[in-house]
Amino acid sequence: MKKTTLLSLMLFLSFIGQAQTVASESFDVALGWTSTTVTSDAGTTINAWARRTTGGAPNCATFSGAGMARFNSYNIPSGGSGRLTSPAITFPDGRYRVKLKMYRDSGYPTDADNIKVYYNTTGAAGGTILGTVNRSTQLAPIVAADGWYSYTFDIPGNISGTGYIVILGTSRYGNNIFIDQISVDLIQAVDAETTALNMNAIETIGNKTISGTIKNMGTTDINSFDVNWQIDNGAIYTQNVTGLTLAAGQTYNYSHPNTWDATPGLYSLKAWVSNVNGAGNDGDSANDSMTKQVSVASGSVARFPLYEKFSSATCAPCYSFNTTYFNPFMNTGTNSQDLALINYQVNWPGTGDPYYTAEIGARVQYYGINAAPTLLVDSKEGTNSNAALLQSALNAEKLKPAFFGLSATHQLDLEDLTVNINTMPYLTGNYKIHVAVVEKETTGNVATNGETSFHNVMMKMVPDPNGTAVDFTHDVATTHTLQGNLAGLNIEELNDLAVVVFIQDQATKAIMQAAYSTDLLANNTFNKSFARIWPNPSTGIINIKTENTVTLEITDITGKVVYPAAQVNAGDSVNLSFLQKGMYLAKMTDLNGNSQVQKIMLK
């Protein structure tokens, strides 16, 4: 078993009729299509298909609306399958086409998780197979990038009466499969569809060629059409394409002769086909156009990737992933210096990790995480149990440009944290600044999976996991000061903290840039050579490791002094067994007046 699952499956459907559409499903309200059950990798019986409002493994939003359907191939052992079957559909005599959107991703690239689409007159397994689509972008039909793609499946010949559409998902133990916006439509005689608009979500300044693909979705040849594009509400540019013999199912790739002089800013690009065969509107105007939101950047800087890992001290597969693959990867070369790491300790399986917090739960919910271990590389699935793949993923991510300059400093005054964040945006738009306080090494959350220490464990989001929304304008620097209090947390040693700052697109979840904050005060860096208490956690007897005599004072988390100040020397032991179990603060001051505070746990 490579993962441990968090099962939270909800089912649903909305079944409506539209003009020339005999059935459609948006998954915006519920999953009314019928899902079969299957045995998960945890040995439990689960629904193979479920409605989701956000996607995890891989991370994705819905194509449109409030919901989508997920086939749980991430948690179904290889070879396991499950059907998603429509309600009975009444087909007036004619020819019909099934349309759907499917999310393709590059995780587990050789794992052939796929869907097969069937037409069946009984709703049982099997029927007439209409087509197959693999989840992996590197498997048929091959696509260039992660994202939503449109797929169509024609039902052979004329049909009438009652029928069903069956979507069979098959797991090869890779990522999940997500589909959205299913419809069953009468095939029109004349129907041209815009199937692709080739423009990145983020572009650089300069002349841009507007290009895309038109597909003949009708039954008759297409001889001519107009291709149009428009930026926001500006001028419309039209190209008349003639001399074609575009048969049913064939495509035409165009490059519009009018280019776009892109300047920094945020734009809406719309492209559409019109005047098909010189007859104005075609039989289905709903598929004529495609719109993309495009941010044009004024510049770029080197990327510092963000790694977010969801793990648990009660998760057996986490032990294997962390000790065999991830920790050695982090200790290879300069890898630990080439990325920012946040480790979220989750609350499953069983009792979950002792250091789980509601703020970790908020990040789990935001990403739709349902299994541990899960590793996100700049918000994209990266849980590779393969050292070479982990390394190549980091190397590839570092080569991608970033469109924010980002730096930060912080100051810790006892348990009050102030973080000053400086940005230089090269994009215009609304993004969120997040701050995560992590402890570099923890041992107090050891549980059942065999791990004895944990790294960069998330302790606090500042000010909270919602982040701080900022309206950025390209080339306009910003400074933000965020504050938080670290009292009452699971922090073992205040001298072992790091602060990670990152900028995220809230809607797409894309990580724009990350950085480690620099500590401003040497005294508050808590150099471990100054003084250290061990063991921590302790059953009552603590040892003092220090180069010089220090004064030790112990307070509880409310600030009440429970062990008055007393001088201690290197190697001295202090008996605190008279205190109740819990968290305490040990303040140590040397003869020069330098002081530091260390959190200690009595158990």
Image (cartoon, grey):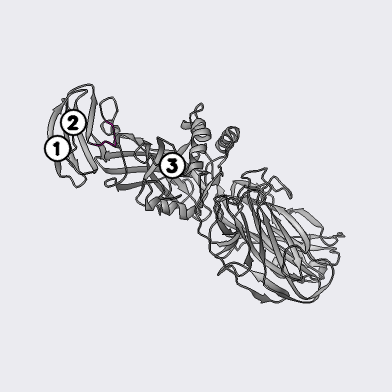
User: 493 or 181: which is nearer to us?
Assistant: 493
State the residue at coordinates (54%, 50%). 42
- Is residue 529 positioned above or below 217 on the image? above
The region drawn magenta spans: 534-539
Left or right of 336 in this view: 595: left
Mark 2, mark 3: which one is toward the viewer?
Answer: 2
Q: Secondary structure at mark 2?
A: strand
From the top left corner, tell me how far across and down residue 162 is, in percent. Answer: 75, 75
Identify residue type, mark 1. Answer: Tyr
From the top left corner, tell me how far across and down residue 360 is, in percent. Answer: 41, 50
Identify residue type, mark 3. Answer: Ile
Residue 569 appears in which quarter of the rendering? top left
Q: Residue tagged by mark 1?
A: 563
- Crowding near the residue tagged with mark 1, few <14, some 14–19, many ≥20 C-alpha atoms within 10 Å: some
Q: Residue tagged by mark 3?
A: 342
Please tell me which of labels 2 and 1 falls first in the chain.
1
User: 483 or 90: which is nearer to us?
Assistant: 90
From the top left corner, tell me how far across and down residue 404 is, in percent. Answer: 48, 43
Q: Secondary structure at mark 3?
A: strand
Q: Secondary structure at mark 1?
A: strand
Q: Residue tagged by mark 2?
A: 574
Residue 271 makes an appearance in the image: no
- Is residue 100 positioned above or below 185 on the image? above
The Cα atoms of the two marked residues, 2 and 3, are separated by 34 Å
The Cα atoms of the two marked residues, 3 and 1, are separated by 35 Å
Please tell me which of labels 2 and 3 falls first in the chain.
3
Mark 3, mark 1: which one is toward the viewer?
Answer: 1
Please tell me which of labels 3 and 1 falls first in the chain.
3
